[in-house]
Image (spheres, rainbow, N blue to C red):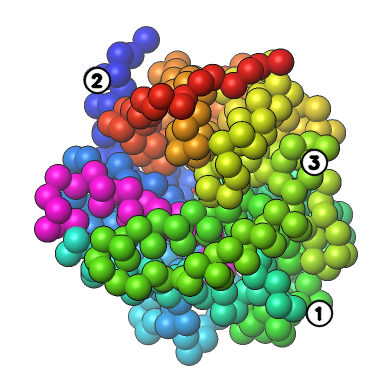
Amino acid sequence: MMDNPALLAAAGAVLRANDLGAYTRPSPRLYPHQWNWDSAFVALALAYSDPGRMEREVDTLLRAQWTNGMLPHIHYNPGITGYFPGPEWWPDVPVRRAGERTSGISQPPVLPTAVYRAGCALPEAGVRRAWWARLYDPLCEMLLFFRRYRTIAGCPLLVMVHPWESGLDNSPRWDFATRSGVRPRLPYARHDTGVVSPAERPRTPDYDLYMYLVELIAGHRYDLAGFFPETPFAVYDALFNAIWYRAALDLDRIAADLGRPPALPADALAAFREAYHERLWDERSALFLDFDLCAGRPIHVETIAGLGAIFGGLVDSGRAGRMYAAYRDRCRACRALPSVPPDQSAYEPGRYWRGPVWVNTNWFVVRGLEEAGLTADARALADETLDLIRAHGFCEYFHASSGVGLGGQEFSWTAALAIDLLMRPVAASPGGARTERR
Ligand code: 9WN
């Protein structure tokens, strides 16, 4: 098996192979354009080896930002075809920057956290500060977009409007909407199942929902107030909201360094935190659950998204340890942390976001445990994650029980987060006692 220097070199080679100059594609054949949170993970890794390329990656992504602050989930490369859905599915609106081809929905806002962490990895304070100062306003706008355009009825939690926005597209948490049986008006032809086995990808009813929602949302010019009464899908996603909160905290750290006022007032963050606990906490599963706004009730499907609050800094270390121990215990027959525990009826160990192990969700938990002072657990999970990659390569995801690599090959964020875990090993901390595994 590869030692750490060899793994680092191999990860670097994946990012070089996916380098298209202005940005890094997530995977050679499956995902040729620029994706929002993928590029944030990539930027984090580039900080260690190529700060110039890191800046380019983020600049290209931010060129896609709409004038209302939204950072789209896909920034299309006009020179590339062969991905479905292409830009023609997302009709133009005045808030889209002229000349840029983008989708009309967003993705979990990892970018502010990536910029904060990447900046910390830069050796020169002057360079770091200049970079942060240049990006600060667009990053604030990116977060404020959700507060301005994605809240309803006075609740500060953020409404997610498409499974693609969650980044965990066919998570069983969204099965309630797939079951509604909606279908788009226009016919469509998928590309993904020609690249990856259909057994590892979302099913046809999932894509019917995705394309129905694209038509609905675009038909209402991407305006939540317009499509909310009709949509079968509007949720408070526990992971998405936790990532947003983490981003707000990290943006405040940047603001403090730059001597600027906080991006979000402390009382707004406190209200958000309170609403998050009140609306989403589920004592029985020791997880935060998502909330279906159309039905007005929690979504009782338990997944790794419910651990997002550990990364978000939304729970203290006692609760973080309990949540993590309980999830691990349910998944003891699995490799590292699967996206869905095997006791959930929808669990499929080899299908996309319905069971396989993903490096980004593990990375969230590692860095969250570390920040909570649970460093022994964080280190153990980081090692298990790196060992999976060592054994099976830089795959998009890994079979939850065999560990075999699945989905797209040469996947950028798997390489990028391996680099981050190797270059910034979990910090030792006196408070880092290992949580009990029952
Ligand atoms: C749709 C690029 C993206 C990731 C998502 C992942 C997958 C796209 C797809 O690939 O989604 O956005 O075509 O399946 O679910 O998290 O950003 O890697």
Which residue lies at the image location 56% right of the left edge and 70% below the top edge? 268
Residue 316: quarter of image: top right
Q: Residues within 10 Å of mark 1 (few under 14, many from 20)?
A: few
Q: Which residues are drawn in magenta?
A: 104-128
Q: Residues within 10 Å of mark 2 (few under 14, many from 20)?
A: few
Looking at numbered disc 2 in the image, what kind of residue is underneath it? Pro
Location of residue 58 with respect to 411 vertically, above or below: below
Looking at numbered disc 3 in the image, what kind of residue is underneath it? Glu
Give the SS element for disc 2: helix
Give the SS element for disc 3: loop
Between 61 and 383, which is closer to the camera in this rendering? 383
Q: Earlier in the sequence, mark 2 or mark 3?
A: 2
CB under 8 Å between callouts 2 and 3? no
What residue does disc 2 label?
5
Residue 283's label in the rendered image is 3
Left or right of residue 328: residue 262: left
Q: Is mark 1 within 8 Å of ligand 1?
A: no
What residue does disc 1 label?
229
Left or right of residue 158: residue 125: left
Q: Is mark 3 within 8 Å of ligand 1?
A: no
The residues bearing labels 1 and 3 have C-alpha atoms spaced at a distance of 31 Å
Residue 60's label in the rendered image is none
Which residue lies at the image location 43% right of the left edge and 50% below the top edge? 38
Which residue lies at the image location 81% right of the left edge and 51% below the top edge? 299
Location of residue 79 with respect to 374 vertically, above or below: below
